[in-house]
Image: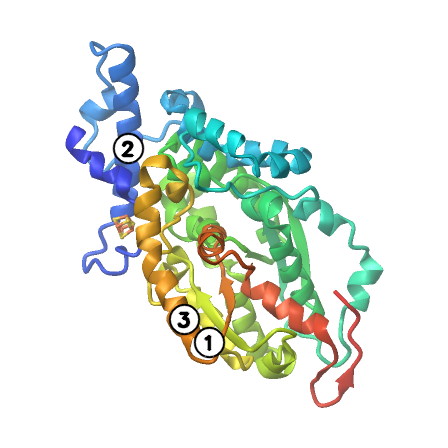
Amino acid sequence: LESARFAELCTGCSRCLPQCPVRIDIPWLNTVLRHRLAHHDHVGQTSRSVPSTETAAAPPNQVTITANTLTDRRTPLREVFFGRYDAAGQWGSRFAALVHAGGKFSLARIALEKIFGVDRRRRLPTFAATTLVQAASKMTQPEMMLDRPGGLSCTTGKKAVLFADVFTNYGSPARGLATLKVLRRLGLDITVSETSPDGRAPLSQGMLATSAAQARGTAAMLKSYLEEGRDILVVEPSVLSMFRLEYKHLLDRPQERDIVHWLRARTFDPCEYLWQLLPACGLDAVRIFPAARDPHSNRIFFHGHCQQRTIGAAAPTEALLRAAGFDVVTSQVECCGMAGSFGYKKEFYELSMAVADDLFAQVRRAEAEGGPRTLVASGTSCVEQLRAGFARPVLHPMELLATIVQAGRITEGQDHDYRSL
Ligand code: SF4
């Protein structure tokens, strides 16, 4: 198993997946190997005479995912720290000001490096004092109805729910609120789910039992929305990718086949959903979101999230932005190098920044002619990496569109008054 240490270098970007002609799921194989390595290391530290039945008996591409999350007790502290983002978010949002202030002190960063192996040159993302679910609950029904622009309503009868994934709920609620407001402007019947850990964070740390338990909880919660006829919108691409790619591994009981199929078929990136919705409603992106009204500039640099590209949700985002009239330069790198927690870990920081160098160079080249561009990225970790490289704001595509809608009057055959978002 020692010779499988290469798996610890795998960022899980999934870009090898569409390249493999026989569709070998290399990211999943590496996840299983990381899981076994964690067990192997634990056994090595505690009792070398006790063999791991899982590592000894199971073939290399299979793992028995037990429902007992206690099996993840062998996971090292640093991996638990990153793998339980949901717990960190719950507490972090309660003490958001304290966490924010603490992150500015180099002493606190040194302590994080010593205890959890987080490189001191990184700043951990902060938490929002008001979560997405809390902010959405304060939007009253009359406000929501007033948001509808007369004449622009989308009457397809579609209904949706915005899944409050833990990264958006605790870390970046503004992206979720922007999505909610843009889609409500179009008259879509959209609500917000309760938050629920979906398994992405523990999966990235090889904590398979915790990941499967979280996936089961989220699938059960979302099932009721699917039964209501609602499509599920997911802001964070790595979570959307879970539904489409990894849940089939995690929810492997025969009675779970249907929910895995539904989640795969009826979960969408918000821009991907909008790109399908506009023509169905006979609406034109350039009329609804005219880039010329962007208060900053219509020149943007868009970096699609690696897993978003693999599942085919980055191309519709780019198409939507171009159709709205943006002058788009798209990054040509496969991954930003941050890849969730990968770039925060002390031993991978240099590698993470080396991977990002190409992305940073592409931004600089794009800005060499004609001046600055608004940086736009869909993934939480891509945003953090671009911020680390350029120390300036990076917007989610839905925040960009919400800014335009907010900026003023928009015409669709005639003028309409828009209230501020
Ligand atoms: S780093 Fe990305 S491309 Fe390389 S093996 Fe892992 S998932 Fe595949």
Mark on residue 330? 3
Residue at 47%, 47% (x, y): give it. 259
Q: Residue furthest bottom?
A: 413
Label 3: how many Cα within 10 Å (few below 14, some 14–19, many 20+): some
- The amino acid pointed to by label 3 is Thr
State the image quarter where residue 296 is shown. Answer: bottom right
Residue 272 horizontal side relative to residue 159, left or right: left
Q: Position of residue 301 (x, y in %)?
A: 46, 70
- Mark 2 crowd level (few <14, some 14–19, many ≥20, 10 Å Cα): some
Residue 402 spot, x, y in % from top left: 65, 67
Determine which of the numbered discs, if any, sits on residue 328 in the image: 1
Mark 1 CB near ligand 1 (8 Å cut)? no
Secondary-structure class at tag 3: strand
Q: Nearer the viewer, mark 3 or mark 2?
A: 3
Task: Assign a secondary structure to mark 1.
Answer: strand
Decide: is 347 above or below 337: above
Residue 87: name its quadrant: top right
- Kindly identify the amino acid type of the residue bearing the numbered disc 1: Val
Of the image marks 2 and 1, the number of the one nearer the N terminus:
2
Report the front residue among 399 and 394: 394
Residue at screen point 42% across, 63% down: 304
Separation (CA) of disc 2 from disc 1? 43 Å
Q: Which residue is mark 2?
A: 63
Please say if the residues under marks 1 and 3 sit with CB atoms less than 8 Å apart: yes
The quarter of the picture where the C terminus appears is bottom right
Q: Is residue 223 visible?
A: no
* In the rendered image, the vertical position of residue 262 relative to residue 256, given as above or below: below
Camera-side residue of 384 and 27: 384
- Amino acid type at image mark 2: Val
Mark 3 vs mark 2, CA separation in Å: 38 Å
Which of the image's four quarters has the N terminus? top left
